[in-house]
Amino acid sequence: MTKAMTPPERMMAVMMGQEKPDRVPVVPFIQGYAANIMGMPPGEFWSDGDNYFDANFASMRLHGYEQTPLFGYAACGPWEFGGKVGMPDGSGELAPYVIESPVKTLEDIETLKVPTFDGPLPGGFAIADRNAERCVEMGMPAGFQAGSIFSAAAQVADTNAFLTWVITEPDAVRMLMDKVSDMFINALEYFANKFGAQQCMPFQAGPLEANGMISPDTFRDLVYPYNLKVNQKIKELGIGAVLMHPCADQNLNIPYYVQMREACDWHGRYIWIFGPETSIPDQMKAFGDHDIICGNVDPIAILEKPYAEVVQLCKDAIDEGKDNPGGFILTPGCEFPADAAPIKVMAMMDAAEQFGRYE
Amino acid sequence: MAVADIYHAILAFKHKEIADLVQKELDLKTDVSGILNDGLIAAMDELGRQYSQGALFVPEMLIGALSMKNGLGVLKPILARTNAQPKGIIVIGTVKGDQHDVGKNLVAMMLEGAGFKVVDIGVDNDTAAFVKAITDNNADIAALSSLLTTSMPAMEKIVTELKEQVSGVKTMVGGAPTSMAFAERIGSYGYGGDGPEAVETARKLMAL
C-alpha cells in the first residue's frame, strides 16, 4: 500500500509539478472561519499576527488541509496610506472595513505619500509580518498581500468618487494606481529581503476590477499596466509562486492576465483562484499548461447547501480539473464563509479523499 | 435647444452640463414634467437598459446618476412649488454589520432618477433605524442592501421585524450574495439584482 503524503508533501508535489500528489490538495481559503472555530473575537483575530497565525494553524490541524496561514484583507490600502479601518466586532462584519479613506479629492492624490517599509510597517503589513514570521519558523511560506492594485486604490480614495474618476479623471486614477503599486513593490522588497524570495508567496486579490464593475477596456487601460509593473517586480525578485484571486466574474479580463504572464516571461507558478463564475475548462485553456488552477466551488453554496450537496459540487470540480497539466487544487471561489459549519470543510476534505486520488 | 439635448447629454456623460441645459429649458418655458420624464428619467432608463445588457458599467452609471442629481437640483424647487408627487417614497440602507455602499448608492441614485423620493440612511442599519426612517418619511418601500454573506442573516431579521413593526411598507432586497430565491425565502416582497432591476421592482411594488 502506498504511504499517504503529508499535507506539506502534497502541496510541494503540486507546486513543483514534477510528480503527482497522492490526491488533490485542498486549500479552503480560510480566514475568518478560523477565528470562529477558535471562539476568538474577530477583532482580536484580525488585529494581531500571533492570534491570526494561532487560529489558522489550529484550523489546519483540525481539518488537515493543505492551506497555510496567509494574511491579507479586502479593505487593504486606506489604513496603509494613513486612513482608518475598523476591526470587526462580530455583529456582522467579520473582517476589517474602511472607516476613512485618505483620498477625498483629486488634490489629495498629488500629496499622498507612498508608505515605506524601513521603519514601523504600515497598517496591516505589521500583522502580515508577524504571521509570516510564525509561518517561516515552522517551514511554511511567508504569505502577504501584493494586490490587487485597483481594489486597493478604489478604497484609498472614496470608492464612489474613484469610480467616477475612472471616466472623468483617468490621469488622476493612473497617478493613484502608480502610488498604490509602489506600496506593494515596497512590501515585496521588504518580505523578500527578510525571508528570502523563495520563501515568499505573495497574493493578489480584488473584486473591484470585476466585469460587473468596470469594462474590459478600462481593465486594459487602467488596471493591466500596474498589474504588469508589480508582477515584473515579483519576477525580478526571484519569487517563484504567487496566489492570484481575480475575485467575482472576471471572464472578460482573462486575456489580460494571460498577456501579463507572457509579458513578464513568467518563470514560476501562478495559482489561480477565480470566482465561481469562471469555468474550470476556461481556466485550463488560459493557464493550464503552466499554472495551477483551482476549482472554485461557490462559497454561498458552501454556506447554504447541506454536506452531501457540497461534496457533490467538490466532486464536479475535481472531475473537471484534476488532470490539468499544470496541477489542480480544490478551493472555494472566494474566501471560505466565516460562519459556515465545520462540516463544510469536512465535505471538501472528504471529496478530495474520495474523488481526488491520483493512484 | 430641446429636451432631447438633455437626454443626449446624459447619455454622453456630460454631467457638468446638465444643470445648465435644464435651466435653459425652464427659461424657454418648457413643461417641467417633460424635462423630467422625457429628459432626465428617459435617459436614466436608457442607461439602465444598456447597463443590464453589459454595455455600460458602474462608473458610467455613477456619472449618469450625477447628471440626474444635477438636473434634479434645478427642478426640485419648482417641483416642490407645484406640489408634484414622487412616484413613491423609498427608504434605502445597507443592513447591520455591512459597511459597503457602492451598490446601495447606485441603486439609490437610479431610484431617484426614476422619479422616486429616496431616503438614504447609509450603512450598518438595524431594524430600529429602518423603522424610524420609514415612520418619519411615511415610506412606501424599504430597500435593504448587503454585500457580505455574513450580513444576510441581518437582512432576514430586518425583513421579518419590519413586517411585525410597520404596517403598509413593502420590502425589497438586493446585493451580491442575495438572489430571488433568497428574497422569497426570507419573505421579502421584491428583489433587485442590480440598479435597473431594482427600479423595475419598485415600480411593480408601487403598481406603476
Image (tube, coloured by chain):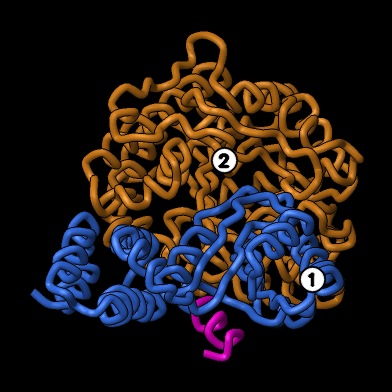
- Residue identifier under label 2: A75
Q: Residue at horizontal 81%, vertical 43%?
A: A90
In the image, the segment drawn in magenta is B198-208
* Farthest residue, direction bottom: B207
Magenta-span inclusion, residue B99: no
How many badges with numbers are in the image? 2
Q: Is residue A148 above or below residue A81?
A: below
Specify whether A59 is left or right of B198: right
Q: Which chain is blue?
A: B
Vertical relation: B53 (above or below) A24: below
Q: Say if B29 sits above or below A177 in the image.
A: below
Point out residue B57 in the picture as x, y percentages from the top left corner.
36, 66
Q: Residue at x 21, y 66 (%)?
A: B22
**Closest to the observer, A281 or A221:** A221
Going by the numbered disc 2, the residue's amino acid type is: Ala
Q: Secondary structure at mark 2?
A: loop
For image coordinates 76% across by 26% down, the residue present is A138
Q: State the CA–CA distance, disc 2 to disc 1.
A: 35 Å
Quarter of the image for residue A175 reads: top left
In magenta segment, residue B205: yes
Question: Chain A hue?
Answer: orange
Q: Residue A79, located in which quarter of the rendered image?
A: top right
Q: Position of residue B198 (x, y in %)?
A: 53, 76
Q: Label 1 is placed on what type of residue?
A: Val
